[in-house]
Structures are given as structure tokens and as C-alpha cells.
Image (tube, helix red, strand yellow):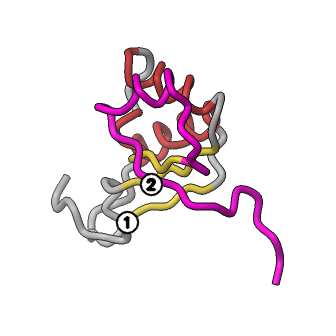
Amino acid sequence: MGTYPGLSAGIGLRAQHHEEIVSRLPPVGWFEAHSENYFAQGGAHREHLTRIRAHYELSLHGVGLSMGSTDPLNLQHLRELKRLVDEVEPLFVSEHLSWSSASG
């Protein structure tokens, strides 16, 4: 069995904890962030994510791509995800295989 970088317990990153994480730097292996919460460039959320990433590994998890839908893939969503991935360089990227939209 191979080894994986960052193999440790992580917790979900929530906006109400951003300031405390940055100021206290708790002993956590990594944080999972919901991708869509950080698509907007600039602003406090994106700044906090960048600051947290300076100290921790990240995993990005999306919930809004709607890959199970009969609609075409949302290319704008994928562009936003790529921009975020390029910026924060997460260990992992995952997405719900769900049907969360229909007809747009």
C-alpha cells in the first residue's frame, strides 16, 4: 500500500471559524472547503482561505456542479473551480455526483 501526503484527519472549514483558525493555528491536519463558497475573487472569504492555506493543506469539495443532471456541464462552474484550484493548490478536489439543477 502506498503512502499519501497529508494523510491525517481534517475538518470542514466554516466561515464563522476563519478568524480563530488564522489567529490560533489549531493542530489540525487539513481543512475541507466547499469550493463554491470561494468562487468570488477577492473579499474576506477568499483572503481567509488564502491565509489558512499558507498554514494548512486543503481539500476542495463541490456541491453545485450537478453532474447527475441531464443538463450540459456548466463550463463557467468548471472555470471558477479551475481558478480556485490553481490558486490554493489543494491536495484533493471532489464533487458531489448529484442532480442539483434542471433546465439551467
Is residue 20 rendered magenta in the image? yes
The quarter of the picture where residue 35 lies is top left
Q: Residues within 10 Å of mark 2 (few under 14, many from 20)?
A: some
Q: Which residue is mark 2?
A: 61
> Going 34% across and 60% down the picture, which residue do you hit?
72
What amino acid type should be assigned to the residue bearing mark 2? His
Residue 50, percent from left and from top: 55, 25
Where residue 58 appears, as percent x and y from the top left, is 58, 45
Q: In which image quadrant can residue 13 be found?
A: top left
What residue is at 37 percent from the left and 51 percent from the top?
74
Q: Is there CB contact under 8 Å for labels 2 and 1?
A: yes
- Residue 96's disc is 1
Q: Earlier in the sequence, mark 2 or mark 1?
A: 2
Q: Is residue 23 left or right of residue 92?
A: left
Q: Nearer the viewer, residue 63 or 80?
A: 63
Q: Position of residue 12 (x, y in %)?
A: 40, 50
Which residue is farthest top?
43
Quarter holding the N terminus? bottom right
The image shows residue 15, relative to residue 6, as above or below, that is: above
Badge 1 marks a residue whose secondary structure is loop
Horizontal side of 30 relative to 42 (left or right) equals: right
Residue extending furthest bottom?
A: 1
Magenta span of residues: 1-30
